[in-house]
Amino acid sequence: MRNKRKNRYSKRTGRKADGIFGIVFGISLALLVTVNLLSPEKEMSKEEDRRLAGKPRLTWEGFSSGDYMEKNENYLKDQFAGRNLLRNLKVTLKRLGGSREENGVLIGDNSQLLEKIALPKQNVLNENLDAIQHFAEGNKDLTVSMLLVPDAANVLNKDLPMFYSGADQKRMIAQVKRELEESVNWIDAESALNKHADEKIYYKTDKHWTTTGAYYVFEEAARQLGITEGTAGKYATYPISATFNGNLAAKSGCRKEIQEVIEIYTPLEGDTDVVVNYVDEQRKTTSLYESAKLESTNQYEVFLGGDTSVLDIKTVAESSRRLLVIKDSFANSFIPFLTPHFREIVMVDPQYYGGTIEDIMETYRITDALILYSGNTFFQDNNISGVLNSEQ
């Protein structure tokens, strides 16, 4: 009899607990839905340093193709209330479990974060190589140089996570060199950086090279770019920030506590006056550095204000040469080394530029061209061929 009473009591207690749990869960779910409905849509994530997905417009074409559903799913993920808390919890649990990778970022030794080496999209790579060859062969009067910068995971082997085995970017760069060396003036950035792998040539929390890394490659590139005067020992270095925490920390949620130094190199001699024209924005400045960016979430944008479609830099260099630079963001901290040696530098970022290279060649009296890309971007960016090919 006592056991029966005990069993009935246990069942009543269990049903009551289930009921309480159901009520609490229902209230929590209702609150969560309400908060998500009332929360304003966010454009940017400061924590991840990226633009968040906006609410997609419903069309029959998008719905029937499945594109709307995919975009709506990304929108719900990005705009979900409390996503940063859940993301940080996820990162912490994975780290406690021994994970050495988060969101495409390798958690390396010596506090080093490294962007994973991306496998090339073969059709994109072939189109890019064909477009570069076509451009070089169609402009025989230009000296066309190619500078392909290896990513940190290629050079900083000692900092890679133990037992990590990724794509071989050295082989991929060697393939590009074989394909292009008869068409372009190849600049060996990989060897220059490997010589200084024990120095801070890449940021620990950001994918970009440091200004020191860019300088070492400039020393290697100077002669091949026709810069005859020596460059060693002709620069002073100045720290402009000691609070930099880069895009890999934002992307992975790791090493957020690290603060790094950003330096600039300034020539010790000569006149460094410039006029920088942001062509599409119709804005001009007299500095290669935009100090306001040091107060933003992406301090690397202090170099030239970040990426833009077309940038025209006029200098007071004695040279009459005019350089076209087709580039990604790695070029932004490299360009200041070139301004004393060219009368004009025109920068084109294919990710933002909607015209063709003929538009640029007709507008500016270009004498030299430099294609400067990081490995990961070059092997995946399908915008390069679109800009270099005359047919749109």
Image (spheres, rainbow, N blue to C red):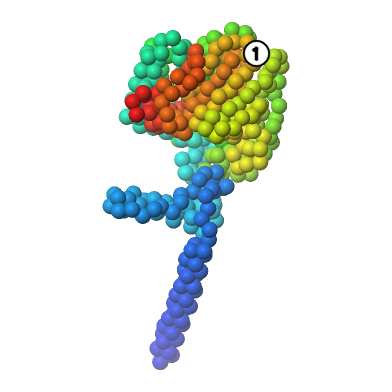
- 142 shown above or below 43: above
Q: Position of residue 318 (x, y in %)?
A: 63, 10
Q: Image quadrant for the C terminus? A: top left
Residue at left offset 64%, top offset 22%? 274
> Residue at 53% across / 22% down in the picture?
346
| Residue 166 at least partly seen | no
Answer above or below: position of 110 versus 12: above
Quarter holding the N terminus is bottom left
Q: On the image, which quarter does residue 118 sit in?
A: top left
Decide: is 91 above or below 26.
above
Relative side of 174 to 105, left or right = left
Q: Amino acid at mark 1?
A: Ala
**Dot 1 lies on which element?**
loop
Judging depth in this view, the residue of 319 and 175 nearest the camera is 319
Q: Is residue 273 visible?
A: yes
Q: Mark 1 highlights which residue? A: 232
